[in-house]
Image (cartoon, rainbow, N blue to C red):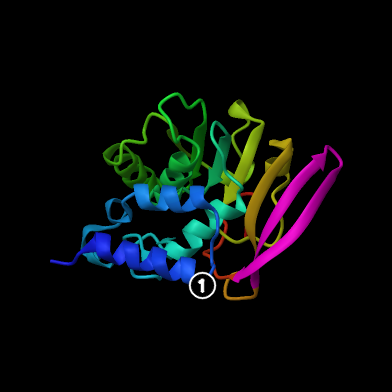
Amino acid sequence: MRDLQKDKNNLIRMYKDRELVKDKNAFRAFRQVPRELFLPEKYSSSAYSDHPLPLMNTGQTISAPHMTIMILEYLELRENLKVLEIGAGSGYQAALIAAAISSNSNTTGHVYTIEIVPELVKFAKNNIKMASYDNIVTIIEGDGTKGHREESPYDRIIITAAGPKLPPPLIEQLKIGGILVMPLGKPRSYQVMTKFRKISESEVTQEVLSSVAFVPLRGEHGI
């Protein structure tokens, strides 16, 4: 039987040696959340292979471990933030974010994550419950490119699928001083993970972080 904890420790050691991530909070969350709980059973032994894995026959994937931990650092997470995720997938990234914003039992932070594929909504809800994050993660079925205005504004927004432009409703729902991270680009074309910082209602800065390859952003303001 494969030693998944050993595999996880080896990944952490490699990321540190390569200085891929430096955020201690990101590493803490990565250690805490068992990726194997968020995979279809036949892939559980590959939980800490550093590559994306398919999510049933949905056409969606769970990102490679290095990307999920890099996203935690990109978001500059801390305790008690309100975070919106577009593209719940299996629920793994939401669980990582939840761990990063709730290092104690008195957290007031929360993660709202929207998924457009009904099969994945059910899968993610079950996984989040098994991992005991259902008290601080809410999974919503719908078009994530429209955001979730009911709980806005958000301190952080993460989009886990690639689109050619930033969906206007999402920047509107971001707090002033907040951060939005998304892969910009088209499917099977050049994509860059990009960080947007909302300076004021009329000013947003933009920073290119890394080259990436993500599934298409589905919805009214997506592909």
Residue located farthest toward the left when viewing the structure as drawn: 1
Report the amino acid beneath label 1: Arg
Residue beneath the point at 38% across and 29% down? 135
- Residue 204: x, y in percent? 81, 48
As for residue 208 lying within the magenta part, the answer is yes
Residue beneath the point at 31% across and 44% down? 127
Q: Which residue range is magenta in the image? A: 191-211
Instruction: Using a 10 Å C-alpha cutoff, classify the residue at mark 1 as few (fewer than 14 neighbours), some (14 to 19) or many (20 or more).
Output: few
In terms of image quadrants, where is residue 162? bottom right
**Which of 13/213 is in front?**
13
As for residue 95 lying within the magenta part, the answer is no
Residue beneath the point at 53% across and 59% down? 70
* Relative height, residue 14 to residue 135 (above, below): below
- Residue 58: x, y in percent? 38, 59
**Residue carrying label 1:** 18
- Looking at the image, residue 64 sits to the left or right of residue 81; the answer is left
Q: Main SS of the magenta segment?
A: strand
